[in-house]
Amino acid sequence: MTKTFIGIVAMAAALAAAESSNITGTWNMGLEGDHVIPVALVLKQDGRNLTGTIALPTQNAGSRVEVKLTGEFADGAFKLSGTVEGAKEPTTLAISGKLLDDGSMEGKFEMPGHGHGGMSWTAERLKERK
Amino acid sequence: MHLSRRAVLKGVGATIALPFLDAMAPAGRGLRAAERKIRLICVEMVHGSAGSSLIGARKNLWAPAGVGRDFDLTPTSLRSLAPFRDTLTIVSNTDCPSADPFTASEIGGDHFRSSAVFLTQAHPKQTNGADVHAGLSLDQLYAQRFGQTTPIPSMQVCIEKDDQGGGCGYGYSCAYTDTISWASPTRPLPMVRDPRVVFDTLFGVLRLNESPAERREQLALDRSILDWVQASTRRLQATLGAGDRARLADYLDNVREVERRIRAVEAFSLSGEVREQPEAPAGVPDSFSDHVKLMFDLQVLAFASDVTRVFAFKLGRDNSNRTYPESGFGGAFHPTSHHSGKEAKILEFARLNAYHVSMIPYVLEKLKNTPDGDGHLLDNTVLLYGSAMGDSNQHNHKRVPFFIAGHGGGAFKGGQHLKAANGTPLANVMISVLHRLGVDDIASFGDSEGRFEL
């Protein structure tokens, strides 16, 4: 009886952990350059697999480009990568990050060959409203 | 002789409304409190404040440390308001959640939403088309209730380039960036940048399709609109007592002085000299402070003559790179607001905030020196100043800058700093302002959740 109870509790805890560590959703991500640039990071987690998009501002003020992302999530941390379509030169980006205890995320954003050593970022889940 | 409150000086092509004169009061008595009309000025400055950042809040760069009546303005960007401390109600620590993104596609569009939120506290619909939607703005709510008996219900003026048309970015119409004044959720009101247009509107001056060459000819004639109403002025003066004659003469002197300054700016603009803002209408001065002061002088004249009781005044434009050399700091506005969270840069941004606020004592002094019945205009005016942006470096809408100046005919005690509980929407303050101003039959405003004790 006791063993069964412990088993149920352990299973519930594992399920709760899996639930809380699922990063599917829309994230309001702040790229920390010379100021904080808010960008939309939309993710879908299927087991360890991640897909999604990030909407990055372009050099034309007020416009954005959406980049498709793929990656993997494991042990509370993840890696994503994508290619900017339509750029003058082939441009790839890499995002690494981890889920924090308070439900927010943080990490590093890199665009190799674009003159900066990467940017730190933080993100909070968007409270979607209508 | 009794004179109607709506009596005017009339000439061919100009109509000048009059200030309140003793001859307008029944049986020679002054304007009683119940007859006083409260004037409203709503001023928006974009890009939030240095004091909205965490470091800036700790250093009291916007809101003072003390609350209640015991507060010190010295470290704050509001220090120039010290001579008017007793008229001041500082409300700190409120947020504008309607300026936050609601959906993924809205993330990053904060600069293109903020101005539309300031006086509406409503979330703007993301659209590049004509189907814009925000909310009825506070100034318009007031004007619809109390501005209908004046010749002009309300006026909307601005300092920076307006009416850009089309889309401004992130899928938002420029209507959201161009104006703070909304006559209905779907009707943004255009703002007037040219002091000449404001002057001509106030004084009924007709200039039908005047070309720049014709304008130059008019300027060369060096005639004032007061010349156009000379005969009417003489006739009226002959019927007035000594006090009213002096009051009328002071008022007309002020009209002439404002007109002279506008003409001087136009003459410079049309002279071929290099202008700092070559795209601006001829009546727009190069200097920010000259422009703001002209606009404030026009507002005081409008209030004195009761042509209108409501102004919305937009001092800047989101993403503006304007510089303010008179502030003593040369950095451009938008990049300076992106201070990277570094203390030295936050302090530089605070200098710009302090400079912008330092325009306000000018109008408060003018209002104080302008008679209004048995008191002065400052007694019967409320000025709201703020922004829907908080920390522009984060592009957030928390701890937004906001203060109220003026007693509004006794509606506001003044001389106090009220710090809101965390998460209080600015809309709660705005609905309470409206209630105090007599719009007391509305249960909500924008995203208000309740009232705020002022």
Image (cartoon, coloured by chain):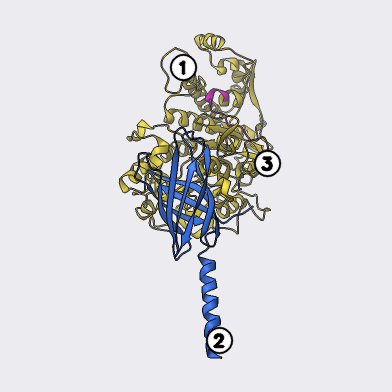
Chain colours: A blue, B yellow
> Where is residue B246 drawn, in percent x and y?
52, 27
Q: Is residue B71 left or right of residue B255?
A: left
SS label for mark 3:
helix
- Mark 1 residue element: helix
Specify start and end residues of the magenta stretch as a single range: B189-197
**Residue found 54% across the figure and 22% down from its top:** B196
Q: Which residue is mark 1?
A: B269
Q: Nearer the viewer, mark 1 or mark 3?
A: 1
Disc 3 or disc 2, which is closer to the eye?
A: 2
Q: Residues within 10 Å of mark 3 (few under 14, many from 20)?
A: some
Residue B44 in the image: above or below residue B453: above
Q: Is residue A9 visible?
A: yes
What label does residue A4 carry, if any?
2
N-term mark: 1 or 3: 3
**Residue B144 circle label:** 3
Tell me where residue B211 sits by quadrant. Answer: top right
Disc 2 element: helix
- Position in image of residue B347 (x %, y %): 33, 45
